[in-house]
Image: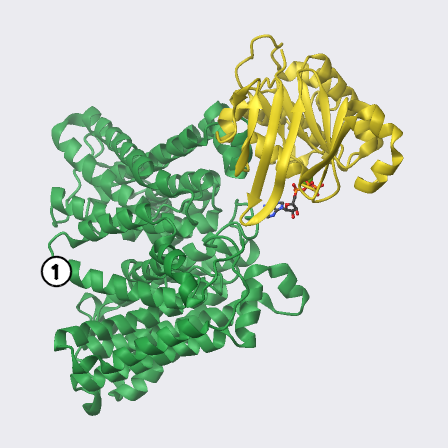
Amino acid sequence: MGGDLGFYLVQALTGLSSASALFLVASGLSIIFGVTRVVNFAHGSFYMLGAYIAYTLIGHLGGALGFWVAVLLAGVAVGIIGVVVELLILRRVYQAPELFQLVATFGVILVIQDLALLVWGAEDLFGPAAPGLEGTVNLLGTRLPEYDLALIALSLFVLGALWLLFQRTRWGTLVRAATEDREMVGALGVNQAWLFTGAFFLGSMLAGLGGAAQLPKGGADLLMDFNILAAVFVVVVVGGMGSIAGAFLAAVLISELGAFGILLIPQSTLVLMFAVMAVVLIFRPWGLLGRPEAPGQHGQAGPPEPPLRPPPPRLRAAGLLLLAALLALPAFADDFTLVLAVEIAIMALFAASLHFAMGPGGMVSFGHAAFFGGGAYAAALLVKYAGSPMEVALLFAPAMAGVLALVFGWFCVRLTGVYLAMLTLAFAQVGWSIVFQWGEVTGGDDGILGIWPSEWASDRLAFYYLSVLASAGGILALQYVLHSPFGYAMRACRDSVVRSASIGIDVQRQQWLAFAFSGALAGLAGGLFVFSKGSVFPDEMSIPRSFDALIMVLLGGVKTLLGPIAGAVTFTWLQDEISRLEYWRLILGALIIAIVVAFPQGVAGFLRARAGPWFGIREMEA
Amino acid sequence: MGLSLSVRGLHSFYGRAHILADVSLEAAAGEVVALLGRNGAGKSTTLKSIIGIVRPAQGAVELDGARISGEPPHRICRRGLGYVPEERRVFASLTVNGNLEVGRQPPRPGLTPWTPARLFELFPNLAGMGDRTAGQMSGGEQQMLTIARTLMGNPALVLLDEPSEGLAPVIVEQMVRAIRALKKEGLAIVLSEQNVNFAMKVADRAYIIEKGRIRHQCTIDELMADEAMRRTYLTV
Ligand SMILES: Nc1ncnc2c1ncn2[C@@H]1O[C@H](COP(=O)(O)OP(=O)(O)OP(=O)(O)O)[C@@H](O)[C@H]1O
Ligand SMILES: [Mg+2]
């Protein structure tokens, strides 16, 4: 009996201790977002850096005191890194549309990944035990590592310290005020720039501290950044953006569910996370302790757009010319170029599908790879287990991706702006975990191999035509729907929820269907992708894949459908060139950052200002 | 001592929409100037262009002869310009004391520094409410709080955007008293109003703005005498 009770007690405390890292990272993300309105994607990277830096410092400073000093110093060091990122990169792009800041922080992720690889190597590092806390304590007959208690104490301490900071100091008051109304705080004589920098220091430091403190339990590895990011996004969405107490509550809730759920059904953690999110989002769409965001505040890149017109003749001609050039390409190009062109065509469809949801739909998806990868896996699994031919699999891919998007979308359309976006990322990461962990069916990390096109399409030339035509068809379908009554209703929902509802549009249903359509076409792209490569790996569902599409759309611009296509061409080609180099992430990341800093309106925005008028694209009358 | 404000030839845009065209106005130390106009005339935009929230495309704003236009709002504020927004933009989740703290800036030579205690004398309604959450106060109380918050910055010149908007008559009377008290302290005040009656109780001079242009300028006595003009430009 006592043993049972002790077991549950220890399980509960284990849950609390694993909440500690989640809480530290999530509260940091929340603080940064509250003040600067930047969702710092690099937050997971800061967490990872905290672990690595602490590892090195602990190696130099021995003893119990040395250990804790190292953990603290690692936090401070990461805080300083955060400040450097803020000063050098973000400060230059605060005026740019919000999403560009995200792209910049994604560049930072890539750079940090390769820097960590460079400095600490590819091997996972085993965390040293905390001196003096190596043992276990006996709680009613069950043993609990002493360090777990230290982690619980640490998070309670941080919670208290943050409370004092925000309630009892002038700086904290200014931060809370700025979270509500930045402009007003500026007009009252407060220099926002330093408030932003301070928030970045504090938020990054908390992430670094979280990474450093979990070192004895989890060690340090190069996957930590993305692994924590999705969980942190869930915590922030459930707890409420901008609420520290909410972050704490949600971190505890999710971790406890994880600790106990695993007893009921192993592998149930993900399902439980879904369930919690579903319940919270239905009853409190702004999270447990969050506040609703003002409509139209986030998720929109730039001022309102002019009414949608059919593409001007010259632009249409340019599109047709492009298609003609693609059809004629095989006459001039070698095999390598054709392979690259196939990839570009597929990525253009993927980017266009994201653009559909993001631009006209007003729903920014950070996790569109869920549908791309979902379609890819649907096709591959059908071929592998049912031996179905390519033609059927290519229909199955968008269908299944569409269904997946219906399921995810059902939750997502209940939210708006940045909440919606974070939720899509969390969902995509859940999908990734499933294909990654469910090795018996999906092959896990080894992927599914040997998925080749049908006989008639196996020739390089035939497959080229197949993928170009299918992608072009998909893009035209998106374009067609955009100009249909459905598309107009969708844009109406984006521009004004209230007015759309008042003229009888069921806003959530409209957005839900739009999201599913976009997901289905991403799935078609995924299906084509499988047959072009002959294989599929969990990478196709991963965060970097989602960001590929996001970057293509943002570089190309969200205003016209041509934007994502141009973005796909540029980015896919660039990636193809760079990825042959060692440390290509470093180069690509630096390049992304440089592009964002140099062209804060996007390359397309820059080009459109120059070449747009000739094509008959009018700049918006804001 | 108060500061004098001089606005010359201001043009402001929202995107491509030309909102202010050649707006000029003056306010001397210790003077209360009213900027009168109907809905959408450009009153708020004028005040926002002075404080720097809207960056004027052309024209100059000078404070005691020193050019301030083009600087960011926090710099302009620290030079002694206080801005009170329309529609009671209090920090709703902060307490009254918290709101005042956000506005606090160092004392200004020649002016008695504002403290919460002095402000509660000026706005007796707020007295004893220090720990109340601003979001839970009445509209009139919030309006007073926005003014008190700005005064915590010890401004020498205050821009007031529609201080009487949506206030009950009793509260309007208190607002009139408060503005007169500020004038007595030597502050210059530029207030925007649709409510001519309110303006006539506190202002010395008036500018009438319509469609982003100053149509007329006169003393308050002249405005009181000229009913035709009030009918042409203002809602009476
Ligand atoms: N953020 C904005 N973006 C675009 N146009 C705006 C914006 N704010 C105001 N305007 C327009 O600028 C014009 C002047 O607005 P302003 O707010 O200065 O008027 P106002 O005189 O203060 O009116 P009110 O009495 O209603 O407060 C109006 O036509 C308004 O529609
Ligand atoms: Mg106004």
Relative image position of residue A310 (x, y in whole percent): 49, 73
Give the chain letter for green.
A
The numbered mark 1 sits on a residue in which chain?
A
Residue beneath the point at 53% across and 19% down:
B105
Choose top left, top right, bottom left or bottom right for residue B24. top right
Under mark 1, the amino acid is Arg
Residue beneath the point at 16% across and 73% down:
A337
- Image quarter hosting the C terminus of chain B: top right
In this image, B167 relative to A507: left or right?
Answer: right
Q: Quadrant of ligand 2?
A: top right
Choose top left, top right, bottom left or bottom right for residue A201. top left
Label 1 sits on residue: A580
In this image, A186 relative to A398: left or right?
Answer: right
Most distant residue in the bottom direction = A456
Instruction: State whether residue A201 is above or below residue A19.
Output: above
Choose top left, top right, bottom left or bottom right for residue A555. bottom left
